Image (spheres, rainbow, N blue to C red):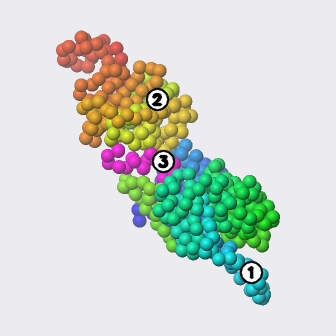
Amino acid sequence: MTAERLIPKETRYPEAQYPRRQSTIPKEDCDGLSVRSATKVTADVLEAAERLQVVGRAGTGVDNVDVEAATRKGVLVMNTPTGNSLSAAELTCGMILSLARQIPQAAASMKEGKWDRKKYMGMELNGKTLGVLGLGRIGREVATRMQAFGMKTIGYDPIITPETSATFGVEQLPLEKMWPRCDFITVHTPLLPSTTGLLNDSTFAKCRRGVQVVNCARGGIVDEGALLRALQSGQCGGAALDVFTQEPPKDRDLVNHPNVICCPHLGASTREAQSRCGKEIAMQIVDMATGKGLAGIVNGQALSKAFAPQTKPWIALARALGTVLRTAGKKAQGSVQVCTLGTPLQDAGNYLTPAVAAGMLAGGAQKEVTLVNALLLAQEAGLKVTTTHSDVAPEPDSSIGLLQVALQGTPHRATGTVQGSTPVLRELNGATFKQPAPLAGPVLVYRAKASDLSAPLSDLGELKPRVTEVFQLHL
């Protein structure tokens, strides 16, 4: 029920692509948008939805969402990375079996009234080597399932360590050593500049002759032109494709090759996966709206920490210090150094840095600055934000931690900490506050000579002629 209130009915499971210049999203009541793979969330759609806060992709890939445009607007993009993993892995295993025994071709021959037993001579999988490119959720599920058929599994992943992959029976090798050892290759990586054309003319030439290739991940990871040439020369003995560079594919040469098995992007097309992804994305959006937490974040990793009770005050402090620094320095340009002090803040830089940037940009020309778009907008505004950490924090804050922000090349520097759940200012431009100043609501900061304020003032009017520097904030 909560998800239905968040997302208008017509935007929950849209079937058609939104027109480039027109959006059916109601501007007045759409805070969240949930889509599947067929719906294109373009920059125009994002611009039309004025109140939009989150786009939820019921599935893994976000190729259909303009993530950069969403980030620029401060709209969070999330997906359900585990929802269809089993379905995609099972399809991949079915593709490997189909290649080994030519099951689709034999079935089609039978439907034509033929009985070609000799034509469809296959191979056993037992003892064959399967190369798995990408050892995330789907890759490891494929590997463990194919091990049950007696296949030896080797693989490559730049993130997963060899020690981790060994726990699920995959020996990691450099790509150059992997190509010549594989009887079958299956790819399970995202489509990135580094993975586009991962299998190409050069890599096919290094493979064992007759290698079988499976792609149920993303079109473009396997160079389709190179694959066709390898099939025609016999260097590749067969291919099973669920994805294509262009979907549906207009060039039919690859689809029509007799040694190619094709599906129309069915990796997540099971009743179980569709139901699981739909439920997961709805609950993720509800959890975000109710402040319970975030999962499946694509473009706002800093926000994943924003819902933890222990980090909320630190994010508020970082934003406040950014605002203090911008106001004191009278500009939001240049280089800002963010320094976390103390072991409790050892891993805090990744979510405090965007918060400092958001504070620096607050009240500027940008419409709305959030933790999602703060670093992008800061870069465009000419603001460079860097982060350092030291495990040592001065007393009395060594057990809690300190956050220090400085505008490099100027004397402007602000230091703060959290007392209880309240962000406080400890130091500003070299002046230390004996009693830390709470950073909330309206704040008036001024500098005066100590000798001029030796006695209490009867009213604030007496303060004006004695002050050398003053500025006001609303935090």
State the image coordinates of residue 421 (x, y, percent, origin top left).
28, 41
The quadrant where residue 353 appears: top left
SS for dot 2: strand
Dot in front, 1 or 3: 1
Three-letter code for the amino acid on which mark 3 is drawn: Gly
Question: Going by the image, does 19 lie left or right of 317?
Answer: right
Magenta stretch holds residue 311: yes
SS for dot 3: loop
Mark 3 — residue? 300
Tell me the crowding category of disc 1: few under 14, some 14 to 19, or many 20 or more residues within 10 angstroms, Cα based. Answer: some
Mark 1 — residue? 120
Quarter placement of the C terminus: top left
State the image coordinates of residue 12 (x, y, percent, origin top left).
52, 63
The quadrant where residue 13 appears: bottom right
Whether residue 247 appears in this view of the structure is no
Q: CA distance from mark 1 to mark 3?
A: 51 Å
Residue at image location 58% in from the left, 46% down from the top: 68
Q: Is residue 368 above or below residue 268?
A: above
The boundaries of the magenta stretch are 297-314
SS for dot 1: loop
